[in-house]
């Protein structure tokens, strides 16, 4: 199981991140200040660290110096969106950063990307009768390759990574298209209908009235 | 062209003009004087010749030519150096002539008119110069005698030329000395300007602490002093601006942080709730966080609004009795604080005096200070209020028996969002705005707020208000 250390002094946020990640099957440990984080790092090993910059006692940048020799990937969490702060974090060896306020789904996506970069998660997903190889970007059904466009593949991956989760249209649009959702856009529905027909998910990928879609999978 | 070069050239041209004019005037004047004297001498010798001739034989050449020649020779013998040459003619006939007459008298010498003397200066073969005096006298026998005398004045010309040469040499040396001296002088004079310029450039390139060293009491020294004063003021202003920008940046940064923290929780939990993956328990927890973080945002906005209102709106001061007000404050809070083991006590003068204050703001100020004192004490203690009433306002000292203020925090206490201990403040639901608010309230009353640690533990907060007397 993948272990993640959450270093965040704001308890509500820390709890929220823990809740999100636990739902996805990650094992989480919360540290509320720099010393506690250092203690945890000494005791056990972690696969990923989520690190708030402004934490009491030792600040995030200083803690980074301590983490670097351990070669554990770090994602910065910062309230300051200033470029200088972000650059400083990345220079110090962070893999990525998230600016507050963020959505849970964005956090999950970034965590997933970093873990895959470090090859800590499986490159192949088995969801709803499909084999999705995220490295070769191939989708197989019973050993047979299904040809998808890039947008359809991204959509498929989003649902495959968030099974049983209700995904809102605007969330889907923002994650796949990378832009703000244009009000009343039908792009999401059109692409999803085509994609689920291609992969044979007509009964699994269900529309939720006034919300969006949800992928039903066998437990 | 540099100023020192300009000054040098000016000095040189003035000097050469004045000395040139003065020198030539002097030389030519002395030359003219000498010439005049020579002329007088020549005239007196000329007269002497005539009178000698008259005395001997009434000027008749045909009567006594030998006599005339004898007289002339005698005269020459007596005054050997008076003439360079002599010639005496009667009409066209030459009566007497010295040996060198042909060298001295030019061949084109005109015949003088009767009873007239004429002067002329002629040049000789080898640069000699002669002063020639000619005259004619009519004798009784219708014979006109012509007398030609020549005086050697080469010496005068020679002296003049010598003078001019010497003068030119002296002049050259003078010009040279003057150039050197005026260059040195002007350099000494303009050196402070160079220093001024160096310092100006240093300041322009950002070194605001650079200053000119003042060495003189003159106008340039005054300019340097003014310049230094200007630089001083500028440095102060720049520093103040920089500080104010830093303060503002800190404020904006802290504000963003304070806003974004609850926002992150609100958005995150709301998203988790609506995705429908939470258990009943988790849903309750999420809703609880949404509620509490929403409350936090609301409290933050209220505090900020309070701060803005004091800064922007002119509230009227009213005449109140500070003693009565403080007594009421302590009475109201005493039971609440007693439950936490904190004893409140008040020392104040007799009631009856009034001061101009804004009662709501003072109440807020007291609440904030008391609340801070409470937070500084872990388990019980005492808070003492001391009220003094000077002529023009009032002084309130709030003393607690808490943990005191870390020295490095003293300077930042009244900054918005500054918290001495972030973690503890967060637990107690603070934003670091309390003392910023107090500062604004005190400013509104034209007063000051000071913080000091007590040696035996605890801290003093001294508020001086200058509302004035009604």
Image (cartoon, coloured by chain):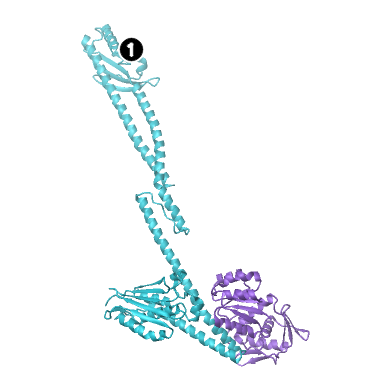
Chain colours: A purple, B cyan
Image position of A166 with respect to A49: above or below: below
Q: In this view, does B8 lie to the left or right of A204?
A: left
Depth order, front residue of B241/B396 = B396
Asked if residue B397 can be seen in this view, the reply is yes
State the image coordinates of residue B424 (x, y, percent, origin top left): 50, 78
Q: Quadrant of residue B308?
A: bottom left
State the image coordinates of residue B76 (x, y, percent, origin top left): 29, 12
* Quadrant in the picture for the C terminus of chain B: bottom left
Q: Outermost residue, front direction?
A: B456
Q: Outermost residue, right direction?
A: A143
Depth order, front residue of B282/B153 = B282
Q: In this view, does B422 lie to the left or right of B444?
A: right
Image position of B229 with respect to B468: above or below: above
Asked if residue B308 can be seen in this view, the reply is no
State the image coordinates of residue B325 (x, y, percent, origin top left): 32, 82
Tell me the residue that label 1 is attached to: B98
Depth order, front residue of A176/B49 = A176
The mark total stands at 1
Image position of B234 with respect to B119: above or below: below
């Amino acid at each position: 199981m993948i272990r993640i250390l959450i270093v965040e002094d704001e308890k509500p946020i820390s709890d929220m991140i823990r809740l999100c990640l636990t739902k996805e099957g990650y094992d989480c440990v919360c540290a509320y200040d720099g010393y506690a984080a250092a203690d945890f790092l000494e005791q056990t090993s972690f696969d990923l660290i989520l690190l708030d910059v402004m934490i009491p006692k030792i600040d995030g940048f200083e803690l980074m110096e301590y983490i670097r020799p351990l070669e554990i990937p770090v994602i910065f969490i910062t309230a300051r969106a200033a470029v200088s702060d972000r650059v400083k974090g990345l220079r110090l060896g962070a893999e990525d950063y998230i600016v507050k306020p963020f959505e849970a789904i964005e956090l999950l996506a970034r965590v997933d990307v970093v873990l895959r970069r470090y090859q800590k998660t499986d490159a192949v997903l088995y969801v709803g009768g499909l084999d999705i190889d995220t490295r070769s970007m191939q989708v197989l059904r019973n050993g047979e390759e299904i040809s998808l466009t890039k947008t359809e593949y991204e959509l498929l991956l989003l649902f495959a990574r968030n099974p049983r989760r209700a995904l809102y249209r605007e969330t889907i649009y923002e994650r796949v298209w990378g832009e703000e959702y244009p009000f009343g856009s039908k792009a999401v529905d059109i692409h999803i209908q085509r994609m689920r027909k291609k992969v044979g998910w007509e009964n699994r990928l269900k529309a939720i009235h006034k919300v969006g879609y949800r992928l039903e999978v066998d437990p | 062209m540099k100023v020192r070069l300009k000054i040098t050239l000016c000095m040189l041209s003035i000097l050469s003009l004045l000395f040139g004019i003065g020198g030539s005037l002097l030389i030519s004047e002395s030359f003219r004087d000498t010439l005049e004297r020579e002329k007088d001498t020549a005239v007196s010798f000329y007269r002497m010749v005539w009178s000698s001739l008259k005395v001997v034989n009434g000027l008749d050449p045909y009567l006594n030519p030998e006599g005339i020649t004898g007289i002339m020779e005698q005269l020459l013998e007596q005054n050997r150096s008076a003439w360079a040459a002599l010639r005496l003619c009667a009409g066209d006939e030459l009566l007497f002539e010295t040996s060198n007459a042909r060298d001295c008298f030019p061949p084109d010498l005109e015949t003088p008119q009767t009873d007239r003397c004429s002067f002329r200066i002629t040049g000789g073969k080898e640069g000699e110069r002669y002063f020639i005096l000619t005259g004619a006298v009519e004798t009784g026998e219708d014979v006109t005698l012509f007398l030609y005398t020549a005086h050697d004045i080469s010496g005068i010309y020679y002296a003049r030329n010598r003078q001019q040469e010497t003068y030119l040499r002296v002049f050259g040396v003078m010009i040279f000395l003057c150039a050197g001296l005026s260059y040195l002088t002007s350099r000494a004079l303009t050196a402070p300007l160079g220093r001024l310029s160096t310092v100006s450039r240093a300041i322009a390139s950002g070194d605001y602490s650079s200053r000119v060293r003042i060495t003189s009491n003159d106008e340039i020294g005054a300019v340097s002093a003014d310049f230094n004063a200007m630089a001083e003021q500028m440095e102060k202003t720049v520093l103040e601006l920089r500080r104010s920008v830093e303060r503002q940046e800190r404020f904006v940064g802290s504000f963003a942080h304070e806003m974004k923290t609850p926002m992150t929780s609100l958005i995150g939990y709301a998203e988790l709730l609506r995705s429908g993956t939470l258990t009943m328990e988790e849903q309750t927890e999420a809703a609880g966080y949404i509620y509490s973080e929403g409350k936090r945002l609301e409290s933050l906005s209220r505090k900020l609004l309070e701060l803005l209102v004091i800064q922007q709106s002119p509230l009227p001061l009213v005449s109140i009795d500070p003693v009565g007000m403080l007594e009421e404050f302590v009475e109201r809070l005493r039971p609440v604080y007693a439950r936490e083991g904190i004893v409140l006590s008040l020392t104040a003068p007799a009631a009856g005096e009034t001061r101009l204050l804004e009662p709501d703001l003072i109440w807020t100020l007291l609440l904030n200070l008391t609340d801070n004192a409470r937070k500084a004490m872990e388990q019980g203690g005492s808070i003492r209020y001391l009220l003094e009433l000077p002529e023009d306002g009032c002084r309130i000292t709030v003393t607690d028996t808490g943990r005191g203020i870390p020295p490095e925090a003293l300077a930042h206490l009244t900054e918005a969002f500054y918290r001495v201990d972030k973690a503890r403040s967060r637990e107690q639901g603070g934003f670091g705005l309390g003392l910023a608010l107090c500062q604004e309230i005190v400013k509104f009353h034209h007063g000051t707020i000071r913080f000091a640690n007590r040696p035996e533990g605890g801290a003093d907060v001294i508020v001086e208000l200058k509302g004035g007397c009604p």
